[in-house]
Amino acid sequence: MANIYDVARRARVSVATVSAVINDSAYVSPHLTARVEGAVRALAYKPNLLARSLAKQQSHMLGMVVPDIANPFWPEVVRGAEDRAHAAGYTLLLSNSDDDPIKEALYLNLFLAKRVDGILLAKAPAPLSRDLSAQIRGSRMAVVQLMRVTPGCGSDAVVLDDEDAAYEAVSHLLRLGGRRIAILSGPPAVMTAARRCAGYKRAMKDAHVKVDPALQYAGDFRVRSGYEGGLVLLKRRPEAVFIANYLMAVGFMKALRQYQLRCPQDVAIVTCDDHPWLESFSPQLTTVNFPKYELGSEGARVLIERLAKPNSPPQRIELRSALSIRESCGQQLKAAAFA
């Protein structure tokens, strides 16, 4: 395999001249540039990408940390980020933290060691250690936070309208006549879960409906906790339930069947996050549709802009959701009753 010295000998120039042409790091006359490029083609020379990145202080790689790649929410977010990164000439390196701060720190340290140009971070529910925060600041690593915002993790963020989304979902159930409305939320320490719970409470307050603590259950955004939360909440006879994500809704529906209850006749449901296959559910689920692809794409766009303009003002972008009304909320059932 040819190396840079072989190219220099064939082109009859110095190694420094070959390096300047390959890395575009200094002026080289058109005549010498043509000789170097001809030697590169003739020898099928492949530059050492690591050395090239060190010379240019740029790797054209972005790191991305997500909390749970098994959650159907995240693959579309990653796809949006990867498409935007690829279009701008970057490679995306993906890691999965499992919402574990220790595992997250391991991957962040790895990204720092590999000299990625920037990081997209969906933060685990714990602050960064002082040492890691200092390393990120010291390296001037560009970090854009996705979904969850934690102090000391970077000034740029792209988030969802979690509180307003939950407010609209619960308000919809209230407009349909529900009063005993339960919430199956995520972990309180996770920003998205806390914001959705706040939206639930605000909707109930604005409708002058007292929030019953017995109708609140905190899961972990996974199927099992949706099932366990369903077993607890359904004993308390809610008229409707707002479920903070799709996976918990799957578990909740299992609990509903175990109690031999019908949706929406006995319990109405609105959940968060929409997927194409939800239309095959029976009943079809009414959902808050979050712009997942746009979340990843916008995060990558903001990160790439930060790399191009390190001193520009911080960006915080909030993407809007939309309510997709189907059978599980009971609206169609009520409309049929009054037809």
Image: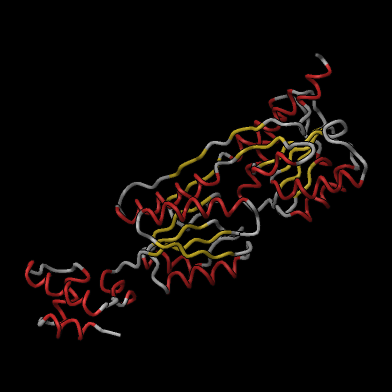
Q: Where residue 182 sits in the image (x, y, percent)?
A: 79, 38
Q: Is residue 334 left or right of residue 46?
A: right
Which residue in the rendered view is the most extreme toward the front? Answer: 42
Q: Is residue 220 above or below residue 199?
A: below
Q: Residue placed at 61% from the left, 38% from the top?
A: 289
Location of residue 88 (image quadrant): bottom left
User: Of 311 and 93, which appears nearest the observer?
Assistant: 93
Q: Residue placed at 26% from the left, 84% from the top?
A: 2
In which quadrant will I find the N terminus?
Answer: bottom left
Q: Residue placed at 49% from the left, 61% from the top?
A: 64
Which residue in the rendered view is the most extreme toward the right? Answer: 260
User: Of 325 and 206, which appears nearest the observer?
Assistant: 325
Location of residue 97 (image quadrant): bottom right
Q: Is residue 196 above or below residue 137?
A: above
User: Of 247 and 178, which appears nearest the observer?
Assistant: 247
User: Of 292 and 41, which appears nearest the observer?
Assistant: 41
Which residue in the rendered view is the most extreme toward the top? Answer: 339
Q: Where residue 157 sits in the image (x, y, percent)?
A: 47, 49
Q: Is residue 62 left or right of residue 209?
A: left
Q: Where residue 50 sits in the image (x, y, percent)?
A: 34, 76
Location of residue 324 (image quadrant): top right
Q: Is residue 25 left or right of residue 275?
A: left
Give the mark count.
Answer: 0
Q: Where residue 318 sits in the image (x, y, percent)?
A: 50, 40
Q: Is residue 69 left or right of residue 155?
A: right
Q: Is residue 70 above or below residue 245?
A: below
